[in-house]
Image (cartoon, helix red, strand yellow):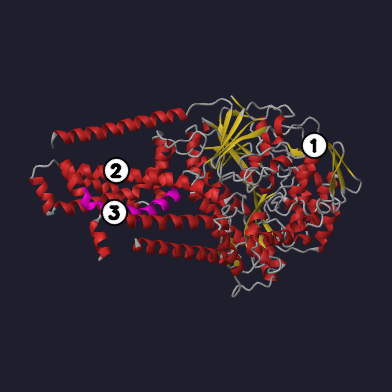
Amino acid sequence: MGFKSHKLLTTIVALVIVSGLLFWGCEKKTHEPTSVVLRFGLENEVTNLDPIKIPNIYALQVAGQIYEGLVGLDEKNQPIPLLAESWTNSKDFTVWKFKIRDGVFLHTDSCFGKNLTREMAAEDVRYSFQRMVSKESASGFALVDVIKGVPEYQAGANQNVSGLRVIPPDTFVVELVKPEPFFLYRITSPLFCVFPKEAVDLGPDVFGHTKAIGTGPFRLVRKTDVEVGLERNPKYWRSISGNLKEIKFTVIKNDQIRLTELRNNNIDMMAIPLSLGSALLEVGQQTNDLPVLKTPFRDHFQIDAFRTFNTHFIGLNCEKMDIHLRRAISLATNREEITRAVTSGTGIATPGTIPAGLLGYQPPYTKDIFNIEEAKAELKKSKYNPKKDKIEFLVHEKDNSEQVGQILQAQLSKIGLNVTLKRLDFNSVIGLILKGDAVAFSMFIEYVFSAPEPMINNLFHSSKIPVPNFWRYNNPQIDKGLDDLRKLGNRAEANALTQKLEKQIIDDAPVVFLYQLNNVVIYKNNVTDVAYNGHNIPLFSEVSMK
Amino acid sequence: MRQLLLSALYGASLLLGVITLTFLLFNVAPGDPARVMLGPNASEDAVQLLRAELGTDRPVWEQLQHHLVRLLRLDLGRSIIDGRLVSVEIINKFRTTLTLGGLALLIAFCLSYILNLFVFYLPNFSPVLALTKIGVITPTFFSGVIVALLFGIFLPIVPLTGYGSTESSWIHLMLPASVVALYPIAVMTSIFREKIQETLGRDYARSAFSLGFSRLYVFHVTLLPSVAVSLLAGWVNLLSTIFVASFIIEVIFSIPGVGPLLISAIQQKDFPVLQGIVILNACFFVLLNWMSEFLFRLIDPRIRHYAKA
């Protein structure tokens, strides 16, 4: 080997060392600690912040910081007045009047002209609600058949929704099709929020993408596909107890990499997905109803679990299964076992759907109703023939559906039920359910309502077939009971009747409810006062960082 | 010239085939875009209204005709999920994928060249080349996660994520690009080595050595031009692999490229976006093939000669 070759090799080695040092230098720069900027790791992109096109819970969690509705929920899931200072309702609960708060300013933006902002008015509320019930709105389902005049508006017969109007100077009126003492609890989610027409007029490429203008405690300052930056709204109408100046939502889709970034101090907080449960939490251990973090994480991080409005279940097509077969499935399902296997201790096994304690509600069953002997007896009464009948159970890619299907298959085989699993994508499963072709399917729902009555009414009234009464459950007794709920203004009476109805529904088993999932969040020790409300919205305005 | 025009015509017909096939496949696949847009809770009436507005309730041939006319006007439409212009969205994402793929290509090119030069100087070290085979035996989705965890936990000297954020720079792409480059490094190092060995036995190579030229001179002036066409052909063939690997790596490292967009478009039945990605990819590869043919002719006089004959 000559002198030249030595020179070449030395040059290569030197280049490798220099580039290594360069990487090191650059890396140090990105690790600089920031005091009042909270970096939150999100598991999916925030594609759209237009309130009528919010695609998923991740976007809603961001939108919940930017926008506000008439009313909201605190961390104890009690309704709190936000943009509505106060409200009244007619005796028959069909007309609701909201007095709009004075002195609330919209986030500053050039769309407002020279002044950069203006005061939010009752007309903004009317405009927002009207846009929410338009035919392209994804959040309209909760209001379209509730507010007067929506079908005519959607069909283009009327330019405005007759059931939404303003009484000058500051009153917004909603007129309903049917009485609803629980109307307030329909609109506590940030999906039903207020935004200005000027922002919407910026066009679909701007509003929801580069701009999102509301009245919330934080305002949008930047949005890319992997990052959403919010900063504290200096003109916010109420005082904020937290000290966060900025929130940076960083999208890291891979669960393992997101956890690594948390350990590497590149994010401060993230929700624990089911796939990381066994890596982070001591299985089977709980302290004060909280899962316990594994040893290496305990020194640097804390966790909290928040009860949110969701329900995970198996839907059974009532038109294709008799009541005894459905009951047999419900009684043979060991919910505790499924919940343990699927949620790593972050779920609560329950045969019902309404969260216990919500507005004082007590569920009809406090424990699992699993009973093999009763299940066998019910199966005998059914038309099911174990020699020739098979139950096709649809599973999909979301929410550990396949794992639930496999466990259920094993559990039901113990009473002699043949279950075959069919794997499809989530949208195809929905398609089959809506056509009435699905026999049994795994599903979950995040409720946008915050009271027991709308939750149960929406899912089980026969007028809601096929959506969202996907199980085609038609029980005149239940329909009558649900209609009676519309007349009860007293909370205790409403809870008692709801409990009776839920018991009947569980016994009829159009749906086998399995568990409700807690939102478990892990965050660094210097983060304090972390809170979420039942809509799974983090209350970042209360969070502080030391 | 005639040959190149013929290839261009072939490319255009291929493109038309791809567009029609994608459209038809998408239409027979289960799922309803209007239902996806409004969610499972929307009433059937609301979904029907939206179907009429999107035109998805019309006969398939009518939809195809409308679709082709729109494409002729270079209008890719808007995403049915977030309402953004598909052309803008895809071009932005494609730029990121091109950057990642380009960086991977550069890394693979440099490493395969350096390794071959190294082994050419020190033939005793040739077993080192076997290490590059790791890139062939490990699938990208596996090596991506392993490399990320390795660098994230044990060797945190390069950032794992953050490309596309306000503080991002090319440094954020180094690790993902290195993973994408693993397979091309293995393949190209092997092709490079094989061709160099083959050429070394030729008379003109032996003559160059006997005339006293340095190894550096022989490698670059005598051997490299002879193997250039084979290497170029190898690189062109590898480009599709690099792009597919980039799509996978983009998902793992949260890079806002075509990969994540493609997956979400498939999951959410966002046909305009899906069609846009397919068309852009088809255009890219048709153009690439056309250019490589042109380059082959430019580099190798034998190809020009045969084409004329």
Please rate how many residues cluster around mark 1, counting C-alpha atoms within 10 Å: few if below 14, some from 14 to 19, many from 20.
many
Query: What type of secondary structure mainly makes up the magenta span?
Result: helix
The quadrant of the picture occupied by the C terminus of chain A is: top right
B189 relative position to A346: left or right = left
Q: Are marks 2 and 3 on the same chain?
A: yes
The disc placed on residue B298 is 3
Q: Residue A504 appears at what percent x and percent y?
A: 77, 58
Q: Residue B288 appears at what percent x and percent y?
A: 38, 55
Q: Nearer the viewer, mark 2 or mark 3?
A: 3
Image-quadrant location for residue A369: bottom right
The quadrant of the picture occupied by the N terminus of chain A is: top left
- In the image shown, does A536 or A193 lie closer to the viewer? A193
Q: CA distance from mark 2 to mark 3?
A: 26 Å
Q: Are marks 1 and 3 in contact (CB under 8 Å)?
A: no
Q: Residue A234 appears at what percent x and percent y?
A: 68, 27
Which chain is disc 3 placed on? B
Residue lying at the far front of the rendered structure = B1
Q: CA distance from mark 2 to mark 1?
A: 64 Å
Look at label 1 and name its amino acid.
Ala
The disc placed on residue B111 is 2
Q: Is residue B116 above or below residue B240?
A: above
The answer to if B135 sits in the magenta stretch is: no
Look at label 2 and name its amino acid.
Leu
Can residue A380 be seen in the rendering of this structure? yes
Q: Residue A270 appears at what percent x and percent y?
A: 56, 38
Q: Which residue is mark 1?
A: A121
Residue shown at the point (49%, 36%) measured from the top left: A261
Residue shown at the point (49%, 50%) measured from the top left: B258
B221 relative position to A59: left or right = left
- Point out the stretch of residues depicted in magenta: B224-249
The mark that comes first in sequence, 2 or 3, is 2
Look at label 3 and name its amino acid.
Leu
